Image: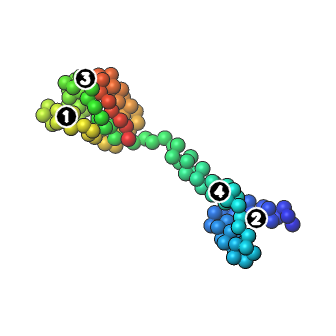
Amino acid sequence: MIEKLAEKLVNLTVKQVNELSIFLKKKYGIEPSNTFLETSMDIPKNKEKNSEKEEKNIFNLILKSPGNSKLSVVKLVKEITGKGLKESKELVDNVPNILQESIDKKEAENLKKRFEDIGAEVELK
């Protein structure tokens, strides 16, 4: 009998645990310890943490700072965006700015490395 009760308690959903807590408090004046409630609430939190750890595949390339080699950064911005020299210079002058949106991970890392090689500070989000 105890084993069956323990098995039922272990398999309760978060909602059911909350309902049981309220029932025990109202009917018997018993308040379950926070340790039990926090432990049973950790299961969904762990699932959320795991989904956050999943690798992101699409990024925005954001220029944070052109660094010391502004002209080289302007040229690279012009090359990757296809914009004119004036528009590229405006993007570099008004940082932070999104240079490219929704690019795949490999391309984003490649572009980030190219910018960092010439002294610019970029971010992938």
Disc 1 designates what residue?
A: 93
Q: CA distance from mark 2 to mark 1?
A: 63 Å
Q: Dot 2 corresponds to which residue?
A: 8
Which residue: 38% across, 31% down?
109
How far apart marks 2 and 4 lie (CA) works out to 18 Å
Image quarter in which the N terminus is found = bottom right
Cα gap from disc 1 to disc 3, whole angstroms: 13 Å
Q: Is residue 60 above or below residue 116?
A: below
Judged by depth in the image, the label closer to the viewer, 2 or 1, is 1
Task: Tally the marks.
Answer: 4
Amino acid found under the numbered disc labelled 1: Asp
Element type at mark 1: helix
Q: Earlier in the sequence, mark 2 or mark 4?
A: 2
Q: Of helix, strand and loop, which one carries label 2?
A: helix
**Relative side of 46 to 98, left or right:** right
Q: Left or right of 110: which side holds 33? A: right
Residue located beneath label 3 in the image: 68
Q: Position of residue 97 (x, y in %)?
A: 26, 39
